[in-house]
Image (cartoon, grey):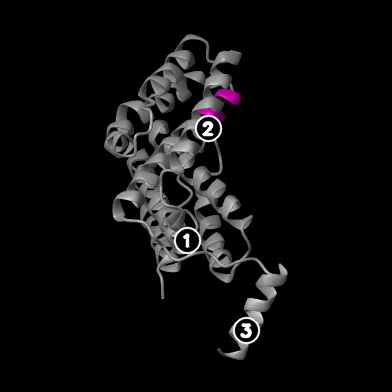
């Protein structure tokens, strides 16, 4: 055994270094499921941010998007894994947002729904959840989806469709939470490089209510997402 490997093994045994991320053990189906759960969470995050800003009319569509646009894409995986369906929970959250957007019931339902999404993510094999390259690739895919929503928000050179802009912002905010969670498992040069690219996208959608003039072009946003995918790509 090489001396370096022996040294690292000894350090791990003594608990002096953080154990490395695992290699992937997931499938494309697993990755897609995790990705779509992330999109759901992104919608709910921006909806919640808008509620806190007392913008219920802007928040309501995003409470509805998970059940109306994404749930069917994950329902088969849930059935395959014998996980209880939560479409009614999502629908109830949307209904609560429409009925009493600033009430405690909505906040309670919101937190419970995030807990359900977190539990559903545990269906994905631990080998994927513990794989830094895989998690970063999913983050890069989410950033690409955010770039698509940003493109849809722009008409005639102006940010005209706030619902699409907020989709983009929610996805990027979700990625930030993923990166923070990954950082708790140990810093790495790969994660640092990804964070540097992520910061560029975060700056694009930082404002909850943006100015009409876009911060960057669609091509630039897509370039950032492409850079993230390259960083996440295994050597």
Is mark 2 in CB contact (under 8 Å) with mark 1? no
Magenta stretch containing residue 11, yes or no?
no
On residue 6, the disc is: 3
Res 168 seen here: no
Where is residue 10? Give x, y as percent: 67, 78
> Closer to the camera: disc 3 or disc 2?
3
Q: Which quarter of the picture shows residue 65?
A: top left
Q: Residues within 10 Å of mark 1 (few under 14, many from 20)?
A: some
Local SS, label 2: helix
The answer to which of 40 and 215 lies nearer the viewer is 40
- In this orientation, which residue lies closer to the viewer: 59 or 44? 44
Q: Which residue is mark 2?
A: 115
To which residue does mark 1 refer? 131
Identify which residue is drawn at 32% across, 34% down: 70
Q: Earlier in the sequence, mark 1 or mark 3?
A: 3
**Does residue 15 lie above or below 198 as drawn?**
below
The first of marks 2 and 1 along the sequence is: 2
Q: Quadrant of the N terminus?
A: bottom right
């Amino acid at each position: 055994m090489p001396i370096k490997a022996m040294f690292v093994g000894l350090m791990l045994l003594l608990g002096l270094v953080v154990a490395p991320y695992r290699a992937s053990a997931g499938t494309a189906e697993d990755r897609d499921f995790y990705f779509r759960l992330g999109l759901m969470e992104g919608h709910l995050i921006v909806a919640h941010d808008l509620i806190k800003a007392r913008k219920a009319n802007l928040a309501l569509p995003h409470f509805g998007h998970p059940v109306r646009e994404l749930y069917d894409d994950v329902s088969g995986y849930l059935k395959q894994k014998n996980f209880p369906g939560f479409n009614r929970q999502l629908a109830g959250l949307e209904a609560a947002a429409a009925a009493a957007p600033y009430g405690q019931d909505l906040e309670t339902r919101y937190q419970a729904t995030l807990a359900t999404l977190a539990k559903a993510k545990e269906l994905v094999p631990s080998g994927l959840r513990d794989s830094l390259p895989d998690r970063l690739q999913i983050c890069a895919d989410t950033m690409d989806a955010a770039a698509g929503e940003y493109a849809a928000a722009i008409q005639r050179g102006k940010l005209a469709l706030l619902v699409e802009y907020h989709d983009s912002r929610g996805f990027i905010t979700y990625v930030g939470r993923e990166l923070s969670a990954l950082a708790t498992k140990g810093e790495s040069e790969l994660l640092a490089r990804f964070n540097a690219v992520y910061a560029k996208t975060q700056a694009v959608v930082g404002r909850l209510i943006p100015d009409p003039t876009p911060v960057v072009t669609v091509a630039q946003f897509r370039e950032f997402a492409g850079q993230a995918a390259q960083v996440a790509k295994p050597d």
